[in-house]
Amino acid sequence: DGLQMHYLEAGHGSPVVVLHDTGGVRQPSLHTLLAQQFRVIAFEIPNVVQPPHNVARTLTQASVALDLEQYVLVSSAASTSIALWQVIDTPEQIDGLVLISPTVLMPEDDTGTSGFARDPELERRLTDLQVATLVLVGTNDEILPPETGRRYVEQISNCYYVLVYDAGHAIETDRPDALCTAVGDFVERRDAFIVEDKSTTINP
């Protein structure tokens, strides 16, 4: 679409695409840890005023240009909508979806104070998703209450919900190793993904 895309690539193995916001790809970060196990492509979301649906289309084109036929897609809070639209538009390309502190299904009483705009059309389309999905929310998240993850489980048919102990909204910064362990396990096993101790909380 005429946009210039910036990305970093490292590692070998199963492909994992990580979406970052317009703040850039930060170091050290989740993609650095994941690159020890997988081939990781970290895209920087272009700083343009376009609907998430359009940006998702551009990222899909960029993935095709990199010969990525199937991959696991990982998003943070700011790129949640883009990742979800990518899966909805090209489900055959996405082999798994990881949503870190996702901000699409915000609490019903949220009046915009969180800074994330609602997308009713995207919320309605979540029931179309069939791909295995992992949702991670920090136990100390001041933007998303812990029960937010259950809303994703109710909307997405093949969805796992995990609470990350002692992490706020920026799980990647607060608990990078715990986050990498959970995401790496999910990338490797998908539907066989489990959390130890019969709990949905990742402890220290």
Image (spheres, rainbow, N blue to C red):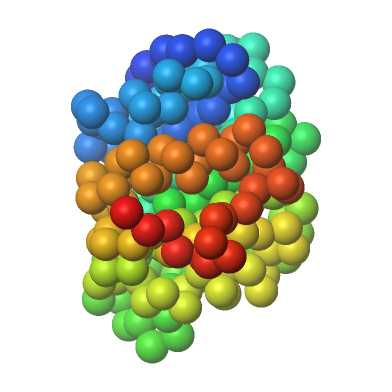
Residue 126 vs residue 185, the one in the foreground: 185
Q: Position of residue 32 (x, y in %)?
A: 34, 24
On the question of residue 106 being in view, the answer is yes
Q: Residue at x 73, y 47 (%)?
A: 191
Q: Which residue is drawn at 45% across and 69% down?
A: 118
Q: Residue at x 59, y 29 (%)?
A: 60
Question: Which quadrant of the structure image shows residue 72?
Answer: top right
Q: Which residue lies furthest to the bottom in this view?
A: 109
Q: In this view, does 90 lie above or below 151?
A: above
Q: Is residue 171 left or right of residue 11?
A: left
Question: Which quadrant of the structure image shows residue 18?
Answer: top left
On the question of residue 56 being in view, the answer is no
Q: Residue at x 33, y 68 (%)?
A: 139
Residue 187 vs residue 195, the one in the foreground: 195
Query: Which quadrant does the C terminus fall into?
Result: bottom left
Residue 71 vs residue 90, the one in the foreground: 71
Q: In this view, does 141 lie to the left or right of 15?
A: left
Q: Position of residue 165 (x, y in %)?
A: 34, 62
Q: Position of residue 65 (x, y in %)?
A: 59, 13
Residue 180 vs residue 86, the one in the foreground: 180
